Amino acid sequence: MTDKPIDWTPDLSLPTSKSTVQHFVAKAGGDRLEIDTTPWGEADLTVNGQSIAHIETAASAGDAFRVLETIAEEFEAAKDARLDQAIEDDEVREKLGLPRVL
């Protein structure tokens, strides 16, 4: 999970009712994240326009959103961890011309 929760904003330009797709947008770590949910529990998570996860059989749109929200937080946390690890890796630092970490 990320240190800071991702702040999701609903797309208010779409009609709101129990029978329409809900669209949520967030920015985290330089990425544009989007979640689309349907009332019957199907949902998609995209990061920078690329599909990351799809759910077909959640009990509700809310359940699907929460699962994808967790996946998005884990995706961002893993990205941050990879960046931190790469900088601490002596071989990578050497290739980048950075001084060795002691």
Image: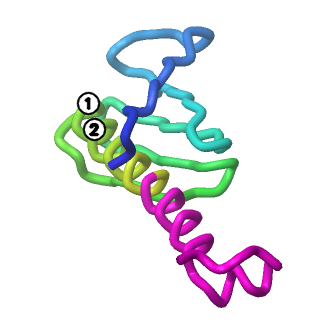
Give how far apart the Cα atoms at labels 2 and 1 are: 6 Å
Whether residue 83 is situated above or below residue 86 in the rendered picture: above
Q: Residue 64 at x, y = what percent?
A: 29, 41
| Residue stretch rendered in magenta on the structure | 77-102
Q: Quadrant of residue 33?
A: top right
Which residue in the rendered view is the most extreme toward the left?
59
Total labels: the figure holds 2
Whether residue 32 is situated above or below residue 89 in the rendered picture: above
Kind of residue at badge 1: Gly
Q: Is residue 93 magenta-colored?
A: yes
Q: Quadrant of residue 40?
A: top left
* Residue named by callout 1: 62
Q: Quadrant of residue 93?
A: bottom right
Kind of residue at badge 2: Arg
Camera-side mark, 2 or 1 = 2
Q: Viewer-proximal residue, 70 or 89?
A: 89
Q: Residue 38 at x, y = what percent?
A: 39, 34
Q: Are marks 2 and 1 in contact (CB under 8 Å)?
A: yes
The tag on residue 91 is none
Residue 87 relative to residue 53: left or right: right
Q: Residue 14 at x, y = what percent?
A: 57, 14
Mark 2 neighbour density, 10 Å: few (under 14) some (14–19) many (20 or more): few
Q: Viewer-proximal residue, 23 or 28?
A: 28
* Residue named by callout 2: 66
Q: Is residue 18 magenta-colored?
A: no
- Residue occupying the point 44% across, 32% down: 6
Q: Main secondary structure of the magenta part?
A: helix
Q: Viewer-proximal residue, 51 or 89?
A: 89
Residue 27 relative to residue 58: left or right: right
